[in-house]
Every structure is written in C-alpha cells, then in structure tokens.
Amino acid sequence: MFQQAVLEKLDGYFVPLSGRPGRCVYFYRLTGVSPQVTAFLKRYYEAARQTGVVLDGQLQNPDTRQLGYFSEMMGTAFRQDRAFLSAQLARWLPRMSVSQREAVAEAMAGLLAELGRQGKNEGMLRNAYTKYMCWLYYRFERMVNRLGAEEVPKILYDGALSQYALQFLTLLSKAGADILLLDRTGGYDKLDPASACSRLYAAEGLTPFPPEFSLKQIQSEIGRDLHRQQLYGAPPSVSPCTNAWMQKPSLESLLVPVQARGNGAGLFYNAFIAQYGVEDKLTYAGSLFALYSRLKAEKRRICVASAPLPLPAPDEIAAIRRQTYRDPEQLAGELAKNIQATGGGELQRLMVRAFLDIVLEEAGRETLPRMTNAAVYLLCWLRRYQKELFDRWKMPETGVFLYFGACATVHEARFLRLLARLPVDVAVLQPDLNGGSCLQDASLLELRREESLSLDAFPVEAGQIRVSTAAYQAERDLDGTLYQDTGLYRSQQYAKAETVTLRSMYEEIALLWDQEVKYRPTFQVVDGVVTVPVLLEKVCGVKDGDVQRYWLDIKKLLTPDTLLLYSLPWLDPRRPPDPMRACATQFLRDGRLLKDRIKNHKDYPFGILRPEMQDHLLDKLQLLLDRRLIAGTYQNGTEYTIISTVLTLHLNKELLRLIQRFDFTKKNPKLVVLCTTEAVLSLEDSILFAFLNLVGFDILFFVPTGYQCIERHFQHPFANEQQIGEYLYDLRPPNFAALPDRERNPIRRIFGIGRSH
C-alpha cells in the first residue's frame, strides 16, 4: 500500500510518482484560501477532472437501484479476507490491473478489520463492503485503473463528509491516489480529531473560504483564464526584471547603464521608483537637473511629464476604435488592437501584454463603461508618449519617464504601472509631502525622505533652477511653524476661498466692516480652503430721519478698501463693446466653463492678475452659473450675458485693483452703493453684484426710499434687508471727502462711548 507523506509545497501534488520521496501520495485538507492557493486549486481542479474525480457536494450513499444491481451481479456472499475481496474486484471492475486490484483489496481488508476491532458486527461490515464497491463502480470507475500510476490520479472533494466517506477516501489514498479535501465548515475535526487520515495545510496569508466560493466558480475562472490566454496571443520573448538588479535603492540607480544591470536570458532590466520628499532642500533642484543632464548625455530617451497628465483631447479619444462589449475579455482584446508599436513586433507584444494585464485586473470591480473609459485613457496616453520613449526601439534599450508631482488619479496610476511593465525606467518625483498619491504596485520601490519642498516644475534647463540660500530656506521652514494652525497667516497664504453671507443687525455693520475677516464669525481654513464671511445688506430708510447723521454714518464706512457708487446703473449701457463679449458662447459647454479656452483667448482680460486670483474669479463665475442666482440662467441665454458681463470687470481699474490685492485672511474689498432715486439694477449690474458677493466683497446698498430697486433680476432674495427708519426721497449724496465728521459713531452713541474723531 502507498504511504502518505508531508508536503513541502502545494505544487508537490504535481510531481510524478517516481520523483516523490518513497513513491508517496498526499492527502491534505484546506480550511482557507489565498491568491497562491486559488491558483493551485485551478491547476488541481484541471488535473482531477482529467485523471481523477471531482466531487462537488457530499458523496451520497448508493441508492436502491445501485444496490439491487450489485446484488444481482455479485451475489450476497461476503468475507473479510483479502483473497475474496480481490476476486470480487476482478469481476466487478475488470479494467483494473492486478497490482491495482491487490492494492485496493489490501486497503479494503485493512479498513474492514479496523471496523471489526471497533465493535462493528458482520452486518455492518457487509454494508460497508457493499457501499465501498458501489462507490468504486458508480463514482470512481473512471480512475481506478489509474491508481498508483506515474501521473498520480487526483480526487478533489468539496462537500459534507461522513465517516464512511472519509474511510473510503483513505482506502483510495492507500491504493495510490492523491486527495484534497476542502473543509469549508470546519466539520472535519469531529470525524478525525487526531488528523490520522489527512493533514491540515497551514501557510501564512490564508483566510477562511468566502461564502460565495464554489468549485463552479473555480471552473468558471479556469474558463476565463483559458480565454485570456487566447487573448494574449503569442507571448513576448522577454519579460521585465524590475528593481531587483539594483545594488542600492536610490534614484541614482537610473544612471546605471542598461548593459551593466544584468544579462539574464529573456529579461530586460528597468526601474520603477517613487521618491516622496527631498533629502536637501537647498540642492534638490540642482540634483534633479544633474540627473536629467547625465541621462541626456548618455543619449537615453527621456520624457518629462508634470502632474497632472493632460487629459486626452477629443481628437485623441476619437482616434481610438471602440464599440459595445459583452464582457471584460472582449473589451480588452478589441481595444488592444489599437496598439501600434513603433519599435517592432516584440515591443508590440510587450505593450499588448501590459495593456491587457492592467485592464483585466479591473474585471469584476468596475462596470464595462468605466473599464472602457479607463482603457481609452491608457491608449491615448500610450500613443502620446510612445514616440519619445520607443522610437526605433531595440533590445536592450530602456527609456526614462520622469513624472513630476503627485499621482492624484487612478487613471494616471494605471498608466505609470503600464509603463513600468515596458522597457522604461519610471520615476515618480514628488518633493512636496503635502500632496497624496494613489500609486501602488507590488514592484514599486518607494523612497521616503523627511523634508518637503514646493517646486513648480522639473528643471530641464539650467535657467529653471532656483537655488535657495540657507537663510531663505530657514525662513520658509519658520513660516511652516508660524503659519500652520496658529491663527497667524502669511500674506497671500491661501489660493482658494469660498464665501458665506453673514446675517447681522444694522448696528453690527460698523463693527464688522473694517475688520479682518479672520475675526468674523464662521471664518475657518479647512484643507487649504478659506471660508470668508461677508456682508450683503440692503439698508432701507433713514434712522430717525436725520439726514446729516445718515451721511456721516456712510462716510465712516469709506475705508481704503471700499469703492463707492453714487448712483445706478453701475455699468454704462453706452460703453463700447468688449472683444470678449462676442466670444461668450464659445466659453460654455454642457454647463461647464471652458476655463482653458478663456485663458488662451488673445483678449483674456484677467491675465494681469496673479494666477491664483484668476482661478478664483473663474471658479466663482462657474459657481454663479451653477447656482442660477440670476433669473433666466439656462433658460433664455442669460448664461452668456453672465459670462460676457463678468469678463468686462477689467474695464473698471479701481475694482480690478481691489480684487488683485484681496488677501483671503485679511480685510476684504467692499462696495457701498447709494440708491437714492427710482433707478433699479440692470441685468448686468445684478450679475456683477452677485459675482462680487461670491468673490468675497462686502456689499451695502443704502436705499433711503425703501424701493425694490435691487430685486428684479435675482432668482431668490439677494441681500439681507434692514429697516432702520423713515423713507426719504430725492436725497442728493454729498461730497463725502468734504463732509465734516462731527457726529459720534451710532454704535458708540448707543453705548455711551466717547466721540469719534
């Protein structure tokens, strides 16, 4: 009889009998899975299907028909001795060889003897004998003539296990079969607490079988894998050896000549590195330029890309042939036909394999439309950069792809991982530790440095290098200590802001008006975005009918950051046409502002402003459209009037200068509007005031008449309304510069505070 042995690795199941120690067999059980075990199960399932038996479910007792046929053919005689059992097997299973028959008879005789020693009577032994014979004939007849063969037959059992079934499997093991049990419920220990019949396979990384696991799932995955092998076609003759050749994990490894990295047959040697942070802030930019210069001197193909990668343009996407797909395999296979390598057939096979690997790993996790979009991104970027990296490629040439900045999207991460499977050194350089990264890969070498440095671009020319002095860098480091979560803010520290309109009493306006916004309620900074509390009030009437004090109170609001409008309308309807007005319809598509197109227009009006303020203005223009604050937006073409009106801001130089010097953590710009007549806001005026409110302006409308002069063109009530006194008409605003300041501030008068000067 065959003896069971200890298994070093699961792949030992597939070693021929003559190559095993002592010509042994294996009988193991699994209580968990891992990626390695799943791969093994697929291979074992195929082997059991071809040379053995796959039992998906419990081994059922013979039914009445099967028992009747056995009695008719073999009679009712029964003895426990080996000679009787061998003779019966010869009649019942004639395809077995003599050695196979003797091995089964010996194993069966031993089992029956053991049952007898356990106290089983002759009737029980006869039932066991009959059950074993029926199982051999009806369930295992296709493999009994393979027992003990050089290619050991295999049994895969996934189901509830009875005592008789375990005994029978032990019989087959002793007769020369490999057996693998899937113990998904943990019930095996009750039948064999001492593990006398089988061994438990234990390894790191095993997790319990998931509820959805089944042999049908394994069979389906095998079919899918076979289909994928057909998709891949002829394999490339070379494979990547990534990072393993490095003697020292460092960015300088990119400078190691390709010929000096290794000479293994069928391998190309590349690097996949991500360096986060910098070692020395003072020398980092210079060291990057030196790295680039040395790579260039060695005539390596170099491609430098800054984050984020420009999205595929409409013409790039249109050039990708695609259709509707029924499954991920068809999607990947058909889209792979778009790959046209410029470096020959070997490079073509490498690109196709890398593309299929990356795309198909999303199968089951993403919908087909999402998978299609992701695959199209990969193909567009591959076409865009392949000439720089692979033009006239030959082994063992290896290009260099330097990605500068944070890999912030999964699309970019997929593309970098695809490149790392090709003859390219991929280096991700992210000196600023404040940005995250979604790049993860088993072959990625991550280098983490303690220092963080903000650098605008990768220096490919000496003129781009900005070398910091030690004193300058020390000051920047001190800034990080002083201005990070301390309530202190550096000038123009933040580039993004959103506004929230305060509701206040009239008497509070004078207190809040000339105050830095950081002292106002609801001010906060979260994730680099400042929440700016602003005032937006319509003040109706004149307090106590005192016109002189009314003008004095307004004069006290005229700070250096305040623009005063004496009358309406603000925008002169007779103003000359602006060149951007005729282009407004070209700047909006599907509700989204085409910001790049606006900036690239030859008459772009905000180009003189600091870049972050330009972005701020365009963001607020998009917000004005999204919120539909102006009546008629996306209904009658008002959206184009909104765009053209905002883009005429530059015509008011004083207003533009207020915007340019606006610091989101300090005093904000302000507008005081005197509405003393029957004139009302025009559509363009309404657009401009709504926009400036979103930008961060404080806006006060003084309406002594109480008329509805600002409401006409707004979708909802625009300003908070304050009723402070009686309505007066035909007031003429004075020359505020010449107006003597003799009265006390109204808030000071309420609380009895001394006179203002």
Image (tube, rainbow, N blue to C red):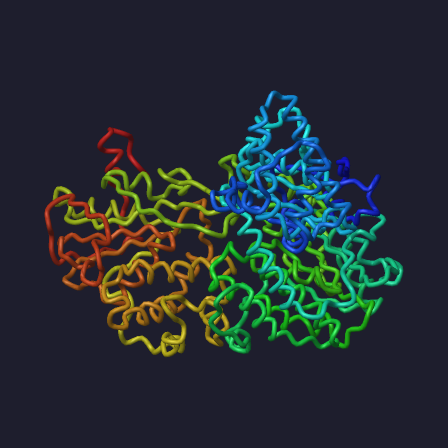
Please say if 39 is above or below 26.
below
Task: Name the residue: 28% across, 42% down.
Answer: 509
- Place of residue 422 in the rendered image (x, y in percent of width and height, measured from the top left): 72, 64
Q: Nearer the viewer, residue 609 or 427?
A: 427
Q: Nearer the viewer, residue 347 or 389?
A: 347
Residue 252 screen position, x and y as percent = 81, 53
| Residue 380 seen anywhere in this rendered image of the structure | no
The residue closer to the viewer here, 403 or 687, is 403
Image vertical order of residue 455 relative to residue 6, above or below: below
* x then y, percent, for residue 644: 35, 71
Q: Is residue 733 left or right of residue 626?
A: left
User: Percent x, y for residue 696?
Assistant: 37, 52
In the picture provided, is 606 more to the left or to the right than 285? left
Number of on-image labels:
0
Residue 540 in the figure: left or right of residue 154 = left
Q: Residue at x 27, y 70 (%)?
A: 638
